[in-house]
Image (cartoon, rainbow, N blue to C red):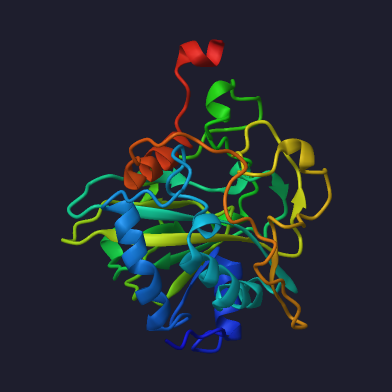
Amino acid sequence: MAFNTRPIRAIGREEIETYQRDGVVCLRQVFDRDWIDLLEPIARSVIIDREDVGLLPTIPGRYMARRLAEYRKFVFESPLAEAAGTVMESKEIRFFFDEFFAKPPQSDAKTLWHCDRMGWPVSGVMVPSLWIPLTPIVKANCLEVLAGSQHDDVPYWLFSPNARQMARPDGRVPHPDVESRRNEPGLRFLTWDMDPGDMLIVHPWVLHYSGGNPTDDWRIAISERVFGDDIRWAPRPDCVNLAGVSFDEMIEGQPPQGDLFPLLWSDDGRSDDDSRYPHGFATSWTHQPMANVNEYATFKELSSIEEPSPARRAG
């Protein structure tokens, strides 16, 4: 197989400006078919057949590059980092983590409107989601984005597992009811038909959503999270936990560096290889049945923006 290491199609100024304006851009033909043929069968075995490949049983849809050589190769050798750096106009791109997102055939499960901003223990805006379909995407099962909503500087209360144990602080408002605004003049709701090999770059502050999957096949995508130039550690107790790095190691104001956050691409040609990136996790566990990756992803996304019950909020 001949895996492309640079985007098949050059990324132009129009796509950079689209990302700046809308908070999302759909890049066509970033990856050749060999990358999809490498990744899709493994995704199906993990998501559909629940094969135990050594992923964390508590988070079976995340950290694939830690355990799966094919996904590790994709992170370090594919053009994803160059594409992200070009669109964000970042001089460097470092790896953050990866995860699966999947919905079964004829599913009506919805992912509520939210943005990712306050889930990450960092400041800055260069921490996008690189949303990459492994199966054909139609508008009805695609990620949907409220164009331009990244320009609203609102630290929404992203109800992460950590935040679910907390009372919502003053000044941290719930995510808005975007569904009720669909007919509001001037708003643009963006979805795409996408082929495997295309990629969305989604701004961390932009509001996004996903409806069900009306097709007869699984809708499977992966999300690669990366860091650009302006990212600095800014840990808060409500952030999502990261396997292998504690809040104690996130030094306020310092850029993420080290073995867990390798340099994937730079505009002057520098990059790290994968020799120091972990091949597993710091903990071990007894064997247990593999959780349903789709159920986990849905729970994570839905719970991230739920309001706690009055009893929990009062407690």
Q: Is residue 86 above or below residue 111?
A: below
Q: Is residue 149 left or right of residue 139?
A: right
Q: Quadrant of the C terminus?
A: top right
Give how far across and how far down residue 57 sits, in percent.
44, 39
- Observer able to see residue 134: no
Please count the marks in the image: 0
At a point 61% along the width and 84% down the height, the residue shown is 13
Q: Is residue 235 left or right of residue 29?
A: right
- Residue closer to the observer: 238 or 68: 68
At a point 24% along the width and 55% down the height, the residue shown is 213
At a point 27% along the width and 44% down the height, the residue shown is 109
Q: Residue furthest front?
A: 286
Q: Place residue 179 in its image quadrant.
A: top left
Give how far across and how far down residue 33 sits, in percent.
37, 82
Q: Quadrant of the N terminus?
A: bottom left
Q: Is residue 162 left or right of residue 51?
A: right
- Residue closer to the observer: 159 or 175: 159
Give how far across and how far down residue 136 sits, in percent.
29, 71
Q: Is residue 283 above or below residue 217?
A: above
- Observer able to see residue 302: yes
Give how far across and how far down residue 101 sits, in percent.
39, 54
